[in-house]
């Protein structure tokens, strides 16, 4: 999750120093102000800011308040380019503590980052962040973080085996650039039917956005005549490196019928197609195949029709929607099981069963609609997992995809999951990775931010290095080629 403020309350130095907490795609609201004819700036000269801060500190030393803070934005016109100074009073371990802080800016050459530091510190802690996914694609974010220590304070990984690496991601579902975008469209179709069943309201006309050139009845007649159907939505294996995203080859009759029903313009046409299917089954004119693990109501009717035992219920719109929803859920279930369990070994059959059955209603609560809704809710989780893994596979190399999938599914099992169908996941996942998995990514990407933290003589210093000023932060400050911006935050704490 991105934080909208660089100043915490109570103040924390790392909030000021960590300018990377600003999203590169963050937008800031623009407000209209009436023109007064005066040139007014919220940033003040450093000498004025110091006088204000001195008065604040003097007042707080004799104040009875336990906590207070003052942060002053400066104009950066001084030689050190001071951006902010301030002070914060708090109570820690029954003692009143006063912390003064400042934030400065300078431009440095990139080669100097690897040089040793002259300031003597007992400990230098470094962090580097590498962006593996361009946020402008709209697929979310993937980054690789490296954490290491260096007694000389060099911002260079010299001992990769003792460096900690973390893969972080927060992916977006439903983007047209996603490797599983066609799957998202199928999920949306089933969701529309599920919503119609739950609300007991007729779907809007052309709720599937079917093409005007599609003729569902003709497609159904061809299907019943035994002609081979071409899937309306392929799941193209594009943009991925190792994943196999093609569905299983053994499509049964309900899979084919689903493709027909998704071409219907409204619920009435869908009911007409279902009625014609019932008629064919009664007369046993069509020879169709359904999988043994297909337990939808329509599949059971087809099996019974072969034995002459089927009793077809009278059709209405509600039953039509339910039958269509069932075969849509069944098609998705088979697809996810094949891709996640069989083709890519992203999860075990035991993991699959536990997550699929986790939300199923109890016997007292059990109803056909509740059971269907619970199954679809579980499939949504598998969808979010597969979407994340496919995007990671498309934009990284050598990552342990089964381990990543297990990590996501376990977090979903614990409830760390946003059930919203579209948009970004509410959770940013962070998983440790080995140097063997991380180092190839470091060779392909330039760091997005560097951070060095040190403590010398009681003064904590945090330096953040960026290639450019974060969007929306204190205006535009250009950075020369071959240089980086260095934001230095320092604080010193005294007991009052």
Image (spheres, grey):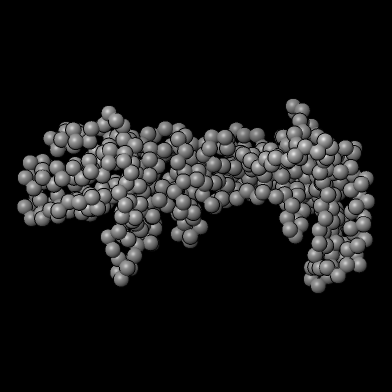
For the C terminus, the quadrant is bottom right
The residue sitting at 6% across, 52% down in the picture is 308
Looking at this rendering, what residue extends furthest in the bottom direction? Answer: 94
- Residue at the (24%, 38%) spot, across then down: 260
Q: Is residue 449 left or right of residue 80?
A: left
Report whether 201 appears left or right of 430: left
Q: Position of residue 107 (x, y in %)?
A: 81, 34
Residue 293 in view (yes/no): no
Work out whether 46 lies above or below 94: above
248 relative position to 36: left or right: left
Q: Nearer the viewer, residue 488 or 343?
A: 488
How many marks are shown on the rendered structure?
A: 0
Give the image location of residue 240, x and y in percent.
Answer: 45, 35
Q: Is residue 197 above or below residue 242?
A: below
Q: Quadrant of residue 114?
A: top right
> In the image, residue 69 lies at what x, y percent?
81, 58
Q: Nearer the viewer, residue 242 or 281?
A: 281
Q: Residue at x 26, y 48 (%)?
A: 324
The reply to whether residue 422 is in sight is yes
Measured from the top left, where is residue 352 in percent x and y? 37, 55
């Amino acid at each position: 999750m991105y934080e909208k403020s660089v100043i915490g309350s109570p103040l924390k130095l790392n909030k000021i120093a960590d300018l990377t907490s600003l999203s590169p795609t963050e937008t800031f609201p623009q407000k209209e102000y009436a023109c007064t004819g005066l040139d007014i700036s919220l940033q003040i000269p450093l000498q004025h800011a110091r006088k204000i801060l001195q008065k604040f500190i003097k007042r707080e030393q004799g104040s009875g308040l336990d906590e207070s803070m003052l942060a002053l934005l400066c104009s950066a016109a001084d030689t050190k380019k001071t951006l902010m100074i301030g002070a914060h009073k708090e109570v820690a371990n029954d003692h009143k503590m006063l912390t003064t802080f400042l934030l400065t800016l300078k431009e440095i050459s990139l080669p100097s980052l690897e040089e040793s530091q002259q300031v003597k510190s007992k400990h230098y802690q470094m962090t580097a962040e590498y962006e593996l996914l361009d946020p402008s694609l709209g697929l979310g974010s993937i980054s690789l973080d490296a954490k290491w220590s260096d007694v000389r304070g060099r911002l260079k990984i010299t001992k990769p085996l003792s460096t900690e690496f973390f893969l972080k991601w927060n992916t977006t579902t439903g983007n047209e650039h996603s490797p599983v975008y066609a799957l998202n469209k199928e999920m949306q179709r089933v969701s529309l039917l599920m919503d119609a069943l739950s609300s007991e309201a007729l779907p809007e006309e052309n709720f599937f956005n079917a093409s005007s050139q599609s003729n569902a009845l003709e497609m159904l007649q061809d299907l019943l005549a035994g002609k081979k159907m071409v899937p309306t939505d392929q799941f193209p294996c594009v943009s991925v490196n190792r994943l196999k995203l093609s569905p299983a080859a053994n499509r049964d009759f309900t899979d084919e019928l689903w493709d027909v029903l998704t071409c219907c313009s409204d619920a009435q046409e869908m009911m007409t197609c279902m009625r014609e299917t019932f008629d064919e089954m009664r007369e046993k004119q069509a020879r169709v195949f359904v999988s043994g693990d297909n337990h939808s109501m329509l599949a059971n009717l087809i099996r019974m029709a072969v034995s002459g035992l089927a009793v077809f219920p009278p059709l209405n719109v509600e039953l039509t929607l339910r039958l269509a929803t069932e075969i849509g859920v069944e098609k998705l279930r088979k697809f996810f099981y094949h891709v996640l369990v069989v083709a890519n070994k992203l999860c075990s059959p035991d993991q699959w069963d536990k997550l699929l059955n986790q939300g199923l209603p109890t016997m007292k609560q059990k109803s056909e609609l509740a059971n269907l809704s619970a199954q679809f809710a579980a499939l949504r989780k598998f969808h979010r997992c597969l979407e994340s893994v496919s995007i990671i596979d498309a934009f990284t190399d050598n990552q342990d995809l089964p381990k990543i999938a297990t990590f996501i599914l376990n977090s979903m099992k614990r409830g760390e999951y946003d059930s919203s169908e579209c948009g970004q996941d509410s959770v940013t996942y962070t998983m440790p990775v080995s140097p063997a998995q991380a180092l190839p990514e470091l060779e392909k990407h330039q760091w997005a931010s560097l951070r060095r933290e040190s403590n010398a003589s009681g003064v904590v210093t945090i330096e953040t290095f960026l290639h450019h000023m974060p969007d929306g932060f204190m205006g535009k400050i250009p950075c020369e080629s071959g240089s980086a911006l260095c934001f230095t935050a320092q604080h010193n704490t005294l007991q009052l």
